[in-house]
Image: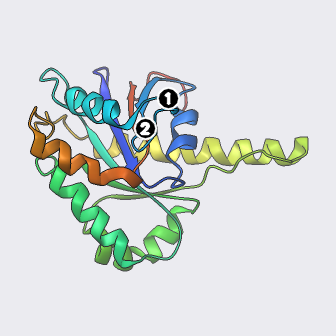
Amino acid sequence: MNERIIVALLGRTGSGKSLTCCLMGKYWNIRYVGLGEGKCGTTEHSKAIKMIRNHFSVPSISYNYICYVKRKERFIDDDRKKFKEFKEIFNDCERNIVIIITHCKQKWVNENRKTIEDYFGNYPMIGVDFPSNEDDDIDDQRKKMERRTQNLNHLLGTFSILNYNGVKLDVLNSNEATENEIQKWIGFVPLINIYYKIGSSGVY
């Protein structure tokens, strides 16, 4: 695949988007903006809303994978509610939705698929585990690096197998109603767009 592949990651704070983004960023250029930040943040919330709206409104950009990221933990009613809001905002790209469950193996996702489907629906589901290296000795760091590499390959390999065609979004057009809907996503930070070419980085 030589064409540009575009992935969007969305999810709650602490879901694992940032670490996933950092690992993929070793091979590809990443741009992201956070929602819900105050005036002292890197991007003020009101400006972030407009930036995201304008970005998704660019007619020349097609998104191959719209990923909803969830940490492995107890599922609650709010998960179902937030995912419903997510689908309402990105209602024209349902065929490109992928669920990513972090801090777990694919085996756990497979074993708990029925529960996940009850909250999120029947979509491709990828389990990944990217452990940090904090306070570890060299041997532990090496083992964790191997685990991160294996999981990164698993993630990118699944994208390659899915091989979704890009879809152009028209969800963030310039109207106040849409901006008000996006404002509800105060707990979903950051939104990350990852640009990369599958198979061209030598990760496999």
Q: Which numbered marker is on residue 197?
A: none
- Mark 1 and mark 2 in contact (Cβ < 8 Å)? yes
Q: Looking at the image, can residue 68 be seen?
A: no
184 w.r.t. 201: above or below: below
Q: Which residue is drawn at 50% across and 29% down?
A: 42
Quarter of image, res 161: top left
- Three-letter amino acid code of the residue under disc 2: Gly
Check disc 1 and report the residue beneath it: 42
Mark 2, Cα crowd under 10 Å, few <14 / some 14-19 / many 20+, is: many
Q: Which of 34 and 154 is in front in this view?
A: 34
Which one is in front, 88 or 41? 41
Counting residues from the start of the chain, the first of labels 2 and 1 encountered is 2
Crowding near the residue tagged with mark 1, few <14, some 14–19, many ≥20 C-alpha atoms within 10 Å: few
| Residue type, numbered disc 1 | Thr
Image quadrant in which you'd find residue 118: bottom left
Q: Splitting the image into 4 quarters, where does residue 184 fall?
A: bottom left
Write down the residue under mark 2: 34
